[in-house]
Image (tube, rainbow, N blue to C red):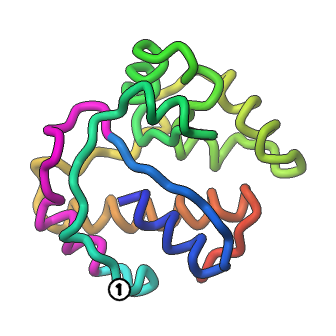
Amino acid sequence: MLGYMLAALAEGTGEQRSIRTAGTFVTEGSAMSSRTRDALLGIDELGERRYGAHRSHQINEDDVEWSDVILASEADHVRYVRSQFDDANAKTVQLVQFVRSAPIDLPFADQLAAVSELDPSPTFDVIDPAGGDQAVYDACASQLWDLAKAFALLVGEDPRS
């Protein structure tokens, strides 16, 4: 969900952002679930998206090398990525922890450096909606949308309200 949200925010401001999504425990090539799609469709500001084209992808070394930042929803995801990929430590952070802890008066690289030094914590987890009903997916999407807008503000985008 977060990848679509960050892409929509970047498009809305005309900023050039390259966004790649990957998971920490996925079945490679699986389609987006109908509950995830419906939760995204419930956020009007995302506009028209091709959700049916999405296929899940397991994070790999190429993704880590390519990325400037890896945003994770849960502490366990941060720990997994950092333990699997040597180059990931300084650029893998929890989204909530970044939004709450990044120094607002510093450039992005310095914000990332500061937050990547923090220990990931379940306190900052966005709860995985897997297995929940549509209301759980909708709540997760709403939380991620708010976090995506906050992240965009911190890194210099001007998100749509």
In this view, 142 is above or below 114? below
Residue 144 painted magenta: no
Q: Amino acid at mark 1?
A: Glu
Q: Residue at x 51, y 63 (%)?
A: 6
Q: Where in the figure is residue 11, as x and y percent of width and height?
A: 57, 76
In the displayed structure, 30 sits above or below 13; it is above
Q: Residue at x 45, y 35 (%)?
A: 63
Q: Residue furthest right?
A: 105
Magenta region = 23-41
Q: Is residue 152 left or right of residue 82?
A: right
Q: Nearer the viewer, residue 85 or 151?
A: 85
Q: Which residue is mark 1?
A: 48
Residue 119, above or below 70: above
Quadrant into which the C terminus falls: bottom right
Residue 26 spot, x, y in % from top left: 20, 37
| In the image, residue 28 lies in the stretch drawn in magenta | yes
Give the quarter of the image for residue 35: bottom left
Left/right placement of residue 87 relative to residue 84 reads: right
Q: Residue at x 57, y 19 (%)?
A: 87
Q: Is residue 42 left or right of residue 153?
A: left
At 39% from the left and 49% from the top, the residue drawn is 21
- In the rendered image, residue 9, in percent from the top left (x then y), is placed at 56, 72
Q: Is residue 16 left or right of residue 27?
A: right
Q: Which quarter of the image is occupied by the N terminus?
A: bottom left
How far from the left and from the top, in percent, is residue 95?
53, 45
